[in-house]
Amino acid sequence: MLKALYSGFTSLNLGLWLMTGVMATLALGSFTRASESGLNDMPLLFWLQRAPLSLSWWLWLCIIFLAILFLNAVICSIDALRKKGRSIAPHLMHAGFLLVVIAHLFSSYGGFKQQMQLTEGGTIGFPDGDQVLVERISGEVGQMGMLSSYRAQLRVKGKVAEVQPNHPIFHQGYGIYLKEVALAPMPMALVEIHREPGAWAALLGALFFMAGNVMLLAQRKGR
C-alpha cells in the first residue's frame, strides 16, 4: 500500500490533475463576490479567518490542491535525486515552484496592505514609532485638463525622498506607493502601504523556475 501511495505521489499525471484543479477553482472564484469583501485589501490568511465559507470555499479548495501539489513536487524531487544521471533542470523547476509557494505563505501570514488619503503635512506612522511626513504634493496638468504626471515629497528620518507611480520608496520593509493625486480643492494623495515578506523568495523561485525551463528547452533543442 505504501509503495502504491509513493508511486501515486511521484506521478506526473497527479501533478497535472492538481494544476488543473487549481486553475479551475481560481476560474470559479473569479465569479464570486470575494473581491468586494476586502480580499485584495488584506493578507490572504487574515481574510480567510473572517470570510464566510460561502465566499471563501474556492480558496480553501485551491489551498488543498496546492498543498498536495507541494507534496507531489517534494516527493518527485527526492525520487529524481535518487536516480543518477538526470538533468538538473527539473530540480531547478521544482525548487522554483516550492519557493514561490513558500513565498506566498509568508506573505499571506505576515503581509500588510493599507490605503490612506493624506494632505500636505499628514504623516504615516510605523510600528517602531517612526513617522513619514508628506511635505509636498504636486503634478502637471495636460491639455485635456487631466493630470499627466504627479509625485509626492516625503520626509523620512530627516531626508527628503520623492515617490511617484511605479516608483515607491521603502521604509522598515514597507513599500510606500503613490496611487492617485488630486490638486483641488487642496493637494491630496492616495497612498498605499504594502509589506511583502515573501517577495525575495518569490523572486528567487521565479529565477530558478526560468533557469530550469531554459535549460530544458536547450537540451531538447540539442536533441
Image: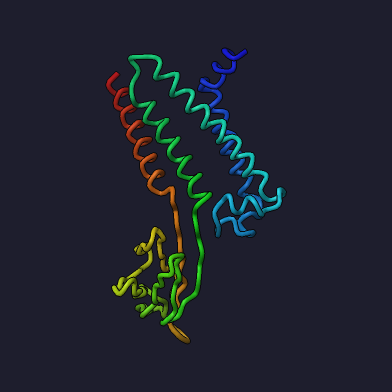
Q: Residue at x 61, y 40 (%)?
A: 25
Query: Residue at image x 36%, y 41%?
Result: 204
Instruction: Look at 39% across and 26% down and name the residue there.
Output: 90
Quarter holding residue 97:
top left
Q: Give the residue at the far bottom of this rendering.
A: 185
Q: Is residue 37 left or right of residue 195?
A: right
- Camera-side residue of 28 and 15: 15
How are the colours assigned in the image?
Answer: rainbow
145 or 154, nearer to the observer:
154
Indicate the quadrant where residue 195 lies. Answer: bottom left
Apparent side of residue 9 relative to residue 99 in the rendered image (left or right)? right
Q: Position of residue 109 (x, y in %)?
A: 53, 49
Name of the residue lying farthest toward the front:
128
Q: Nearer the viewer, residue 4 or 145?
A: 4
Residue 64 drawn above or below residue 50: above
**In the displayed structure image, the side of residue 200 where residue 74 appears, left or right:** right
Whether residue 7 is visible to the viewer of this picture, yes or no, is yes
Horizontal and vertical percent position of residue 95: 40, 32
Residue 179: tell me if it is visible. Answer: no
Residue 171 placement (x, y as % from top left): 37, 63
How many circles with numbers are drawn on the protein? 0
Quadrant containing the C terminus is top left
Viewport quadrant of the N terminus: top right
Q: Position of residue 117 (x, y in %)?
A: 49, 74
